[in-house]
Amino acid sequence: MNPDRQHMTRRQVAAGIGASMAVLATASGRAQQTTEYVDGWRILRARPGQTRLRGADIGPTAISGYNGVTPGPTLRIRRGEELRVRLVNELRDPTTLHWHGLRLPNAMDGVPHLTQPPIAPGASFDYRFVAPDAGTFWYHAHFMSSEQVGRGLYGPLIVDETTPLPIDRDVTLVLDDWRLTADGTIAPFGGMHDAAHAGRIGNHLTVNGAPSADIAVKANERIRLRLINAANARVMPVRIEGHRANVMAIDGQPAEPFPARDGLVVLGPGNRIDLFIDATLAPGTRAPFLTLVDGNIPLARISYDAGTPARGAILPAAEPLPANPLPTRMDLAGSLKFDLPLDGGMTMMMRGGMMGAMTGRGPASNPAQPASIWTIANTASDGHSGAPLFTVARGRTVTLALNNRTEFTHAVHLHGHHFRLLDRLDDGWKPFWLDSIVVPARQTARIAFVADNPGKWMIHCHMLEHQESGMAAWFAVG
Ligand code: C2O
Ligand code: CU
């Protein structure tokens, strides 16, 4: 037990959110973190630890985390700068580290067997790349993903714009969904039910590793709120309460700004959303701020300083975020087109179609998982062995029809690229980019991207139990 904890009041805990990492660390009952560098490498240790997922006053939960905490430390660099991280594996299992949403060189993508060998217990791996895009990203384990991410191996990666933006508070909220037993222990992983249904849906939500967050502001400030859904499987519709919220970026990439209608935004597993919110309530106000719509679960409160407002009035409407160097044109007419039916699940197994596959081995990356339950383009895969889904010449536009034929939602994530969501009836696209897309049951999403990043890239369901039971594949950009 951290001796500092006993002397912390609820208000002090509250004040920590949105302040420095050191205070954040204390707010969720962790030991204070020091940043470790060796020879210019930032050290991240994947190791067991303890976090007070159920609140400051309830005993800690044994987790796995980077530097022993969950979420792991916020990594922060400026666009165009190089990130150098040495991942030290202090777990009992192999691991790798994936930089979700980063358009980085293939060798740094952290996919076991496809881009690097798994990092054995006791070994380390150096990740080094220049961040091409400013925005909100995250990093997470990519080996036995259901269990490793599910035990807490993830953290935020913030890439700052080259010139600072006119905002007063930059607040990152990492949302997660845990399945805890009555004594607060993480429930065991694996098992057929989660894999064959909606994935591992939990019973305990956390915000930055605690049951809720409290955001301290001054009246008339502008807040940049960065939401990250780190849950294994839960799609999170959330509502900003009592304030107008403008969506500024999705999945790390600037969007044409638009107001969140009724304050609502939806994050599938892996998604990020950046919002600008002006603090328009009166000094001294304490009010609900962020709610999970399903079950009306409060996730964050806002606390206004009782003193003078930060300025006489709120700032004028924000300009769009500065553009990242994404492809400026996409040749839809001349694109390579593929149909990727998403199939499988309990319904299909009951029809008998998948029974043969059920006797097979589980994916090599996690033999504990049930065997092939789900397919992409009629193939169940671990996402690295077997033939690529397709091979495409560098620079070519690719259009994919993600046709969800199942009774469950899937959240399809494309590595190494961002894509456009195509309109239904014409050849246009939505005014934002994504790296992960929620495809509801029985619906089709058409996406397009320029395959401009050479290498072997995974495409998989980010419902990690689906990924590990077949809904994974890879493609090659030559
Ligand atoms: Cu966020 Cu392949 O994963
Ligand atoms: Cu899925």
Image (spheres, rainbow, N blue to C red):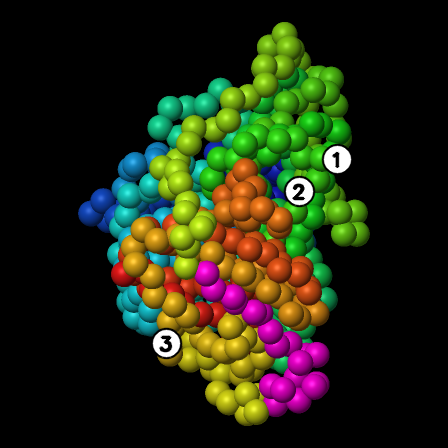
Q: Is residue 344 visible?
A: yes
Residue at disc 3, secondary structure: loop
Closer to the N terminus: mark 3 or mark 2?
A: 2
Q: Position of residue 144 (x, y in %)?
A: 47, 71
User: Which amino acid lies under the numbered mark 2 shown in the image of this protein?
Assistant: Val
At x 35%, y 53%, the residue is 396
Task: Please state the extent of the stretch shown in magenta in the rendering.
Answer: 337-355
Mark on residue 387? 3
Query: Badge 1: few (under 14), some or many (20 or more) residues near its Cα, within 10 Å?
Result: few
Q: Residue furthest right?
A: 295
Most foreground residue, 303 or 403: 403
User: Which amino acid lies under the numbered mark 3 shown in the image of this protein?
Assistant: Ala
Q: Which residue is mark 1?
A: 262
At x 44%, y 51%, the residue is 333
Q: Is residue 345 left or right of residue 77?
A: right
Mark on residue 265? 2
Does the magenta run of residues contain 347?
yes
* Mark closer to the observer (1, 3): 3
